[in-house]
Image (cartoon, rainbow, N blue to C red):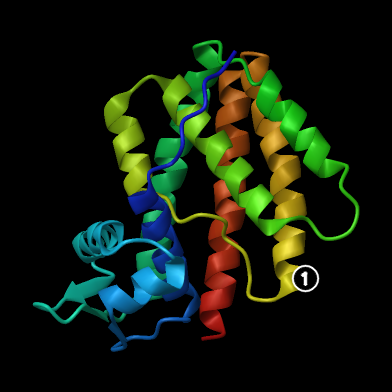
Amino acid sequence: METLELMPVRVRITAILKKAIYSGEYKSGEELSLTKVASQLGVSRTPVREAFQALAAEGLITLRMNKGAIVNQIDQKFIKDTFEMRILLESEAAARAAANGMDTSMLLKRLHAMERQTGQLNKKDYELLNQDIHMAIWNAADNQKLKSYLLELWNGPSTGRSVSDEESHFRQSTAEHICILRHIQAGQAEEAKKAMADHISRSMNNILKAYETV
């Protein structure tokens, strides 16, 4: 049976802010207040400060002494470069998870339950399951360096802006996760690797499509 590990708060906050920058919710030159962001997210300043540091290291923001941060200008190549690294690393993690005999039965049970939901999927439930799936695969890959790199690259669900875009992504992503986990459960490393690469490539295209409309 696979063990589940919660994604660190810092990583989750970094992902939320990263997605907001990619989508244009936070625009180039905009000032981000550490206190305001912490208040909006309902967390303390400490994990937000850590998230700011991670975003600055990635080149998404520039830190200002005691004044929060300024959003940097990014382009489509910046986004593509980031997602291409995720494709390389996370597809390898899926292959290693399959080779290492990861038990995906519990995650598949949760996915099938979500797949059967009628009407609009619960966003929070989807995001939690999404995190659990990816973290479980990273852990099953059994390489701490690989996991550390993937934590830094994590950007959460790569949806469009509208509710219908989100719903469509959640449905497609659920089906893709089932495919990935079935290959892992069957020990099919190459198939799991390809399925993960396809999954993240579609996420990249969603982000790029949203970015084009900014």
Q: Position of residue 101 (x, y in %)?
A: 55, 10
For the image shown, how many numbered marks are present on the structure? Answer: 1
Q: Position of residue 83 (x, y in %)?
A: 44, 54
Nearest the eye: 5 or 206: 5
Q: Is residue 157 rendered to the left or right of residue 110?
A: left
Picture quadrant of residue 63: bottom left
Query: Which structural element holds mark 1?
Result: helix
> Image point 48% across, 34% down: which residue?
135
Quadrant where the N terminus is found in the figure: top right
Q: Residue furthest bottom?
A: 29
Q: Position of residue 64 (x, y in %)?
A: 13, 79
Picture quadrant of residue 27: bottom left
Picture quadrant of residue 197: top right
Nearest the eye: 44 or 130: 44
Q: Is residue 69 rendered to the left or right of residue 22?
A: left
Nearest the eye: 29 or 110: 110
Q: Residue furthest left?
A: 65
> Image point 30% across, 26% down: which residue?
144
21, above or below 213, in the image: above
Q: Position of residue 115 (x, y in %)?
A: 82, 42
> Image point 62% across, 41% down: which residue?
129
14, above or below 149, in the image: below
Residue under numbered circle 1: 164
What is the crowding at mark 1: few (fewer than 14 residues within 10 Å), some, or many (at least 20)?
Answer: few
At label 1, the amino acid type is Ser
> Image point 76% across, 61% down: which residue?
168
